[in-house]
Image: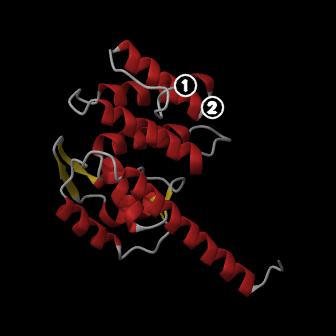
Amino acid sequence: MADNKNSRDKKAHDDERRQRERDMAEELERKDEKEPPVDEAELTAFETELESLEFPATGTDVVAAVGDREVESDDGTYTVEELVPDTDEETFGSPTAVRARVQRPTVAAAMKQIVEASEMLPNADLRGSQLEAYEKTLRELKAIDADDDDEGIQAISDWIVERIRDKEKLPGSRAVRRQAAKYCRANGYQIRNDEWLGI
């Protein structure tokens, strides 16, 4: 396809459509999960505030626009700045994508820690499927036992950050899943082979 205005518009339109499809698929995937700890009405109001941003938006854009906004959850009160990395490396395709991130604050805080650690790597690009796999692994840890003070989430996010610092590269998503499965089995959680962590 020639590089002209029409082809660029088509590419941008296709990118937006694919992002909407990913967001919808993610919402459908989360349908079976337990309800998030943040109140639905609060999330709706938060998403409305995000509509002033132009999407796709970077983490820096989100933090600049609503970073001081507080999100109350079952686990406590967090600011958006504590949950979204202040970086241009991570982008959000829509207000729904930002909402999906902050509705699980302990997972969001761990993802922020991982994304910020990955910025130290000169040739690492933590985006797309690898970022999604990390987040899905952390969500699965949260779902295994919601009453464990999120020790599993902290253990795995710490492990990922240590690997980034020690090996100076991002651990593969399978390695992260394997480490999460080891953690679960060592702490008495049963994992079936057909589950995400069942490596």
**Looking at the picture, which amino acid does disc 2 mark?**
Lys
Characterize the local packing of mark 1: few (<14), some (14-19) or many (20 or more) Cα atoms within 10 angstroms.
some
Q: Position of residue 123 (x, y in %)?
A: 68, 41
- Name which of mark 1 and mark 2 comes first in the sequence: 1
**Residue 185: mark in rendering:** none
Q: Position of residue 93 (x, y in %)?
A: 49, 65
| In front of the other: 144 or 113 | 144
Circle 2: element type: loop
- For residue 187, say whether it is visible: yes
What residue is shown at x 64% (from left), y 41% (from top)?
A: 124
| In front of the other: 55 or 134 | 134
| In front of the other: 69 or 7 | 7
What residue is shown at x 45% (from left), y 42% (from top)?
A: 135
- For residue 127, say whether it is visible: no
What residue is shown at x 62% (from left), y 29% (from top)?
A: 168
Q: Position of residue 158 (x, y in %)?
A: 42, 26
Residue position for label 2: 169
The quadrant of the rendering that contains the N terminus is: bottom right
Marks 1 and 2 in Cβ contact (< 8 Å) = yes
Q: Is residue 27 left or right of residue 72?
A: right
**Residue 163: mark in rendering:** 1
Q: Is residue 169 above or below residue 93?
A: above
- Name the image quarter holding residue 190: top left
Label 1 vs label 2: CA separation? 7 Å
Characterize the local packing of mark 2: few (<14), some (14-19) or many (20 or more) Cα atoms within 10 angstroms.
some
Circle 1: element type: helix
